[in-house]
């Protein structure tokens, strides 16, 4: 006779709940009439087991949330740390002069490094949370299985006793029938007459048969009474001991899981609060200190006027150290526009001084050798010591009289003006193209007669930019290009690279993360349209559509990855175009639906000869996939199973679907490997609802 197992003696008994997990008041809910009636019935075990499984699923999902949140925090922290470190090194290396703004930016970069460290600390804690919840989930799952095994053992014992009782009743009824027949034969034996070749049995034989039937009936009756008594005892123990025992154990396990989930989520909320508070105190501390001043206090220390004075003084010392004494005596004095004399340059507007210095080096020609342009300096090489290979510069940039503005120019700018000619009649072929074009041309009547000049070779132009480069206005550039007699060789711009698609050719996990879903929207839309309007379409996924319709539908999804397809009019009533687009999407994934590091598992599973073992191997390979790939291939497999269910109409059997989809969701596989993988696809489709749960 089976007795209620105790948690201290029987190793197969379910584990007891931890102390103080469930109080006596918590079991009061089990005493409610409706709840007690349902739980003490045959449905109680299934209901309680499903309840625990739901809690364990929630526990697993919470652990997954903690894990993914830790991954996001790790990526965010590392990226922020890398960014802050990079710009911190940039500011520390390039800004040598003591300036308050640079110091404030450096302080802010250090604060960002602290924020990155906070994110990395949060990531480690969340990862530990996830591991703890996963470990608790495993232990709770073992407890659930142990309680379920104990409960099923007791329930099966009762069912076995009831079945034995029913069998004994059947045997007793049979024995009773035989005994009654023997009595009837004995009572009618004297009046029987000989019929056919068989003579009637004697009275001794009839008496013997009666005794045997009576003995058999008595034994059957005794066995029936013992089986009935045994069934009643087993039922009594089940209802009074075993069933209440495993109900309480299930309920205690449920409370234990609830307490763990609440405690872990409470720890998570406290962790988020402390991390947010720590970030807030880092950004703006209540009491700023030299080591932790905060972003606002760092910006308050900026003094623009002091920075300007320090920069000017520092720059003057730097330029005085770099100044060449011989250049100062040869600096050209620039005359203001109002003091220009009357000449060929009278009435012309002096172009503003551009920090970008243009130096033109021309290849000598016979004309330049015979008729050199007049110059203010007898020796051009001395006039332009910085550019000994330069020819004469723009004549309009060298006025005759002095100007106070020359004292404010940097030495490099003053030296460059020494190379310019003061004569407005210099040869335009030997002057700088950009400088000569800055002047307005005189009327045609005032120009000298044209002189036939030999063709000059192209002029090589060198541009030297100062540290403060200011781009000229577009109007002046266009006018210089239009008026210059010599144009530099134009360089065609490099063609811009095509815009990279965010959908086709992207990573599956990136698409899912960007769309905040478990399955890409394009997969959901295409499969739903095929299921609604293409299940009975012959040759679905095998008959191709027109490329124009497929490309049109593809461009719509590229422009809007969250596009919704409602009616067949959205794709010109061509379901084959939707099917082709779905295959193109999986074919162009940057990483195939079955990742490269998992393809060998699926191929090896397809090579298993025994079908049941092959199914188990495919099941194991599916469970090892990443979450994004698992959810997507699960959705696709259920969709293909629906296609197969209508194969008598659409002519797409499991083998046809496997041949089409095998090469689509793996890449870089040989023909034998694709053949083996097609067998894997067949297993997935045929045992779809065994491998996957249909939600």
Image (cartoon, rainbow, N blue to C red):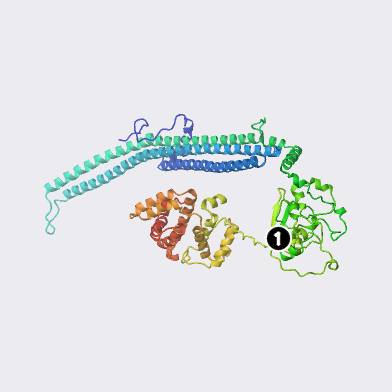
Provide the residue designation for mark 1: 362
Q: Nearer the viewer, residue 258 or 208?
A: 258
Expressed as whole percent of the image width and height from the top left, the position of residue 690 reads 41, 52
Q: Is residue 221 left or right of residue 343?
A: left
Q: Is residue 430 visible?
A: yes
Expressed as whole percent of the image width and height from the top left, the position of residue 394 reads 77, 57
User: Is residue 232 depicted above or below 367 in this figure?
Assistant: above
**Which element is circle 1 on?**
loop
Q: Can you tell which quarter of the image residue 157 is in?
A: top left
Q: Nearer the viewer, residue 684 or 107?
A: 107
Q: Residue at x 49, y 67 (%)?
A: 544
Q: Which quarter of the image is occupied by the N terminus?
A: top left
Q: Residue at x 36, y 31 (%)?
A: 6
User: Is residue 142 depicted above or below 199 in this figure?
Assistant: above
Q: What crowding class fits label 1: few (fewer than 14 Cα within 10 Å), some (14-19), or many (20 or more)? A: many
Q: Can you tell which quarter of the image residue 165 is in?
A: top left
Q: Nearer the viewer, residue 495 or 28?
A: 495
Q: Nearer the viewer, residue 398 or 604?
A: 398
Count of marks overlaid on the render: 1
Q: Is residue 168 left or right of residue 365?
A: left
Q: Is residue 12 left or right of residue 663?
A: left
Q: Is residue 531 visible?
A: no
Expressed as whole percent of the image width and height from the top left, the position of residue 571 reads 56, 64
């Amino acid at each position: 006779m089976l007795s209620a197992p105790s948690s201290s003696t029987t190793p197969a008994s379910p584990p007891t709940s931890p102390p103080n997990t469930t109080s006596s008041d918590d079991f009061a809910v089990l005493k409610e009439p409706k709840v007690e009636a349902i739980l003490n019935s045959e449905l109680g075990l299934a209901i309680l087991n499903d309840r625990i499984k739901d809690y364990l699923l929630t526990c697993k999902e919470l652990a997954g949330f903690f894990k993914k949140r830790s991954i996001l925090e790790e990526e965010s922290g590392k990226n922020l740390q890398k960014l802050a470190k990079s710009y911190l090194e940039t500011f520390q290396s390039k800004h040598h002069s003591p300036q308050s703004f640079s110091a404030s930016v450096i302080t802010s970069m250090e604060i960002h490094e602290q924020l990155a460290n906070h994110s990395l600390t949060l990531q480690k804690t969340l990862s530990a949370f996830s591991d703890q919840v996963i470990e608790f989930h495993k232990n709770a799952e073992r407890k659930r299985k142990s309680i379920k095994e104990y409960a099923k053992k007791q329930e099966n014992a009762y069912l076995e006793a009831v079945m034995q009782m029913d069998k004994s009743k059947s045997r007793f009824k049979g024995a009773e029938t035989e005994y009654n027949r023997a009595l009837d034969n004995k009572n009618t034996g004297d009046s029987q007459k000989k019929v056919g070749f068989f003579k009637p049995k004697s009275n001794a034989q009839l008496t013997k048969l009666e005794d045997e039937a009576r003995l058999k009936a008595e034994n059957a009756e005794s066995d029936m009474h013992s089986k009935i008594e045994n069934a009643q005892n087993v039922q009594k123990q089940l209802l009074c001991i075993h069933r209440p025992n495993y109900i309480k154990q299930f309920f205690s396990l449920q409370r234990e899981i609830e307490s763990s989930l609440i405690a872990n989520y409470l720890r998570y909320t406290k962790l988020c609060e402390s991390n947010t508070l720590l970030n807030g105190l880092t950004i703006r501390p209540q009491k700023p200190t030299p080591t932790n001043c905060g972003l606002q206090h760092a910006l308050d220390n900026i003094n623009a006027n002091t920075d300007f004075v320090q920069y000017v003084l520092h720059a003057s010392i730097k330029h005085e150290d770099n100044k060449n004494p011989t250049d100062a005596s040869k600096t050209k004095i620039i005359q203001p526009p109002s003091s220009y004399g009357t000449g060929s340059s009278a009435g012309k507007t002096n172009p503003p001084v551009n920090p970008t210095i243009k130096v033109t080096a021309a290849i000598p020609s016979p004309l330049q050798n015979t008729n050199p342009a007049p110059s203010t300096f007898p020796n051009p090489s001395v006039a332009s010591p910085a550019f000994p290979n330069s020819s004469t510069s723009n004549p309009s940039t060298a006025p005759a009289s002095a100007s106070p503005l020359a004292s404010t120019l940097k030495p490099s700018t003053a030296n460059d003006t020494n190379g310019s000619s003061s004569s407005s009649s210099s040869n335009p072929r030997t002057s700088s193209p950009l400088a000569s074009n800055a002047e307005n041309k005189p009327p045609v009547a005032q120009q000298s007669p044209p002189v036939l000049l030999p063709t000059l070779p192209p002029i090589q132009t060198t541009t030297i930019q100062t540290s403060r480069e200011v781009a000229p206005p577009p109007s002046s550039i266009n006018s210089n290009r239009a008026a210059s007699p010599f144009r530099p060789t134009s360089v065609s711009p490099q063609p811009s690279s095509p815009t990279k698609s965010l959908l086709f050719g992207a990573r599956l996990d990136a698409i899912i993360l960007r769309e905040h879903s478990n399955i890409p929207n394009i997969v959901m839309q295409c499969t739903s349209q095929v299921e609604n309007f293409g299940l009975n379409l012959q040759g679905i996924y095998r008959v191709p559509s027109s490329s124009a319709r497929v490309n049109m539908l593809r461009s719509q999804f590229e422009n809007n990855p969250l596009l919704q397809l409602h009616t067949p009019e959205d794709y010109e009533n061509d379901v084959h175009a939707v099917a082709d687009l779905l295959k193109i999407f999986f074919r162009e994934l940057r990483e195939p639906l079955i990742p490269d590091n998992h393809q060998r598992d699926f191929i090896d599973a397809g090579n298993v000869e025994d079908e049941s073992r092959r199914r188990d191997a495919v099941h194991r390979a599916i469970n090892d996939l990443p979450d994004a790939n698992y959810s997507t291939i699960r959705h696709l497999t259920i969709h293909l199973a629906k296609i197969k269910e209508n194969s008598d109409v659409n002519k797409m059997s499991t083998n046809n679907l496997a041949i089409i989809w095998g090469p689509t969701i793996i890449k870089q596989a040989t023909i034998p490997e694709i053949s083996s993988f097609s067998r894997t696809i067949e297993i997935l489709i045929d045992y779809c609802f065994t491998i996957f749960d249909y939600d």
